[in-house]
Image (spheres, rainbow, N blue to C red):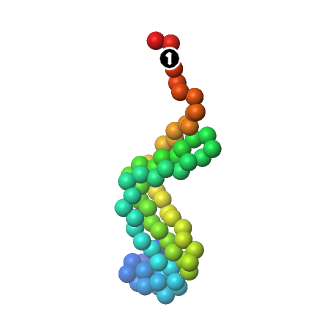
Amino acid sequence: MFPGMNPRDMRMAMRKLGINQEEIDAKEVIIRLEDREIVISSPSVTKVDMKGQVSYQISGEETERSLNSEPEISDE
């Protein structure tokens, strides 16, 4: 975050500001939209609690899937 700052000191400073971080061991993250899904494989997920406001930071390999309600039928 800040160049040259010790990661341990950074965590202590964040804790003093009321910011807690927790790594989550997730296998897959799926974000469902109206017409499709965003799938993040092998994600790195961090839960950030900032004075009661919880947010999640997600990074990984992204793919999309459509959510068609009609099954695909081939002519064969």
For image coordinates 41% across by 55% down, the residue present is 43
Q: Considering depth in this image, is 4 or 9 the residue closer to the camera?
A: 9
Mark 1 lies on a secondary structure that is loop
Asked if one can make out residue 69 in the rendered structure from this viewpoint, the answer is yes
Q: Quadrant of residue 36?
A: top right
In this view, the residue farthest toward the bottom is 16
Q: Residues within 10 Å of mark 1 (few under 14, many from 20)?
A: few
Label total for image? 1
**Residue that carries the numbered disc 1 in the rendered image:** 74
- Above or below, comparing residue 37 to residue 27 in the picture: above
In this view, the residue farthest toward the right is 34
Q: The residue under label 1 is which amino acid type?
A: Ser
Q: Considering depth in this image, is 52 or 71 the residue closer to the camera?
A: 71
Measured from the top left, where is residue 18 in percent x and y?
A: 52, 83
Q: Considering depth in this image, is 7 or 41 the residue closer to the camera?
A: 41
For image coordinates 63% across by 44% down, the residue present is 34
- Above or below, comparing residue 61 to residue 17 in the picture: above
Asked if one can make out residue 6 in the rendered structure from this viewpoint, the answer is no
For image coordinates 44% across by 61% down, the residue present is 45
Q: Considering depth in this image, is 62 or 70 the residue closer to the camera?
A: 70
Measured from the top left, where is residue 7 in percent x and y?
A: 39, 78
- Above or below, comparing residue 49 to residue 68 in the picture: below
Measured from the top left, where is residue 56 in percent x and y?
A: 51, 64
- Above or below, comparing residue 31 to residue 66 in the picture: below
Measured from the top left, where is residue 27 in percent x and y?
A: 37, 53
For image coordinates 46% across by 12% down, the residue present is 76
